[in-house]
Image (cartoon, helix red, strand yellow):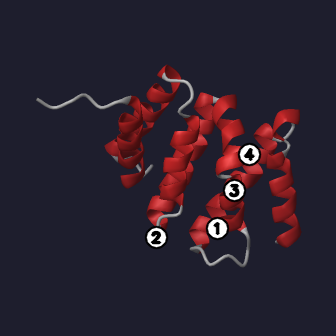
C-alpha cells in the first residue's frame, strides 16, 4: 500500500511540475503553480522550503527551466503575499540580482527576466519599510547597468 505524501513532498512534486513545463500554455505549469499556492495557503511555515526548491530550479543549467522558475517565484509572491515576499529577501533576492547583472554569465533572456523582476519587485514591494531590500537591489542593478 502506497503511503500518502506529506506536505513537503507534495510541495517538492508541485515545484517540479510547475517548473518542468512553461508559462506558454502547457498544462503542467498551471497545475503545479496552483498546487504550490494551495499547499502554501494550507500549511504555514513552508515558504522557506518552497523558496529553497525554487532557488534550485532557478540555478538550473537549462535557462528555460530557470526562466519558468523565476515566473513561478513571481506568481507565488503576488498570490501568497508578505510571508513569501519577506522570505524571498533572505532566500533568493541576491541570486536573482546576481543573474540580472550585465556581466553575469547567464543567458541574455534570463538576465533580462531577472532584471525585469528586480525592478518590478522594487516598484511593488520596495516602499514597504519591512522590504526595502527590493529597492536596494534595484538601485544596485541601476548602478551597474
Front label number (3 vs 4): 4
Badge 1 element:
helix
Q: Which residue is mark 1?
A: 111
Q: CA distance from mark 1 to mark 3?
A: 9 Å
Q: CA distance from mark 1 to mark 4?
A: 15 Å
Q: Which residue is mark 4?
A: 121
Q: Which residue is mark 3?
A: 116
Say which label, 2 or 4, has the lower sequence index: 2
Q: Residues within 10 Å of mark 3 (few under 14, many from 20)?
A: some
Front label number (2 vs 1): 2
Q: CA distance from mark 2 to mark 4?
A: 24 Å
Badge 2 element:
loop
At 64% from the left and 67% from the top, the residue drawn is 111
Is 41 displayed left or right of 12 in the figure? right
Percent x, y of residue 54: 51, 50
Say which label, 1 or 4, has the lower sequence index: 1
At 72% from the left and 79% from the top, the residue drawn is 103
Residue 11 is drawn in which quadrant?
top left
Say which label, 2 or 1, has the lower sequence index: 2
Amino acid at each position: 500500500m502506497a503511503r500518502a505524501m506529506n506536505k513537503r513532498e507534495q510541495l517538492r512534486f508541485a515545484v517540479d511540475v510547475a517548473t518542468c513545463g512553461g508559462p506558454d500554455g502547457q498544462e503542467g505549469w498551471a497545475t503545479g503553480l496552483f498546487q504550490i499556492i494551495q499547499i502554501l495557503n494550507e500549511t504555514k511555515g513552508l515558504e522557506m522550503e518552497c523558496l529553497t526548491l525554487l532557488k534550485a530550479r532557478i540555478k538550473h543549467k537549462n535557462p528555460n527551466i530557470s526562466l519558468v522558475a523565476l515566473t513561478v517565484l513571481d506568481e507565488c509572491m503576488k498570490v501568497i503575499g508578505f510571508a513569501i515576499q519577506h522570505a524571498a529577501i533572505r532566500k533568493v533576492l541576491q541570486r536573482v540580482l546576481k543573474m540580472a547583472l550585465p556581466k553575469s554569465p547567464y543567458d541574455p533572456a534570463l538576465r533580462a527576466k531577472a532584471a525585469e523582476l528586480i525592478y518590478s519587485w522594487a516598484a511593488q514591494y520596495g516602499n514597504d519599510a519591512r522590504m526595502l531590500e527590493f529597492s536596494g537591489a534595484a538601485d544596485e542593478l541601476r548602478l551597474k547597468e
